[in-house]
Amino acid sequence: MLKSLLVILMSSVLVNNYVLSKFLGICPFLGVSKKTDQAVGMGLSVIFVMLLATLATWPIQTFLLDPLGLGYLQTIVFILVIAALVQLLEMVLKKYIPALYQSLGVYLPLITTNCAVLGVTINNISDGYGFIESMVSSLGCGLGFLLAMWLFAGVRGRIENSNPPKPFQGVPIALISASIVSISFYGFAGIIEKLFA
């Protein structure tokens, strides 16, 4: 059991990274990755929302939607739950960590529409994970999101100090850099399989 949970965790962080291999959550990835502190703040917020969303949506799906034959409402219900959780997070950050609240700006409400959060909750159900496995998967996906944000913020910091050719300045060099970071994560697939085989 512990071994399978480690595989789920490590796979979610490195191999099945929602940003770098599934390309979900690209908006905050590109928008908030200019500064490391903002990227880490956004990553921690996403981890928190992913865990809370899974904590709420898995029982709703398992004990309410499936038994009543309402599985077709999954996406709508999950979006409403995630929106409520983000509102809660926004109020907490505004009251207790106003500097982070100000630095995240418009990107904090975007967690509501962050397809990575919705994707995690839906994929946990479709992958047939139990409650504990779903929570571990969500933690891994959140940590993977944080890792991608942190790494890319470092890369973008280096890009700011370089002088790329004029046609590549701004978003083009950011997208090229993101693709190179993404390619580097594909090498982890074999390592995870060998470590936990």
Image (cartoon, rainbow, N blue to C red):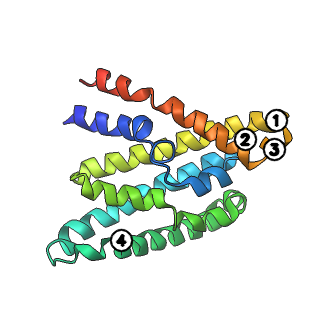
Q: Are marks 2 and 1 in contact (CB under 8 Å)?
A: yes
- Label whose residue precedes the other's in the sequence (3 or 4): 4
* Three-letter code, disc 3: Pro
- Label whose residue precedes the other's in the sequence (4 or 2): 4
User: Disc 4 and disc 2: Cα gap in Å?
Assistant: 35 Å
Question: Which numbered circle lies on residue 173?
Answer: 2
Front: mark 1 or 3: 3
* Three-letter code, disc 4: Thr
The residue that appears at 78% across and 47% down in the rendered structure is 170
Callout 2: 10 Å neighbours few (<14), some, many (20+)? some
The residue that appears at 40% across and 36% down in the rendered structure is 15
Front: mark 3 or 4: 3
Q: Residue 92, position in %: x, y?
A: 57, 66
SS for dot 3: helix
The residue that appears at 35% across and 75% down in the rendered structure is 77
Which residue in the protein does label 4 denote?
Answer: 75
SS for dot 4: helix
Q: Residue 140, position in %: x, y?
A: 40, 43
User: Disc 1 and disc 3: Cα gap in Å?
Assistant: 8 Å
Question: Which numbered circle lies on residue 167?
Answer: 3
Which residue in the protein does label 1 denote?
Answer: 164
User: Disc 1 and disc 4: Cα gap in Å?
Assistant: 42 Å
Front: mark 4 or 2: 2
Residue 49 higher or lower than 186, as above or below: below
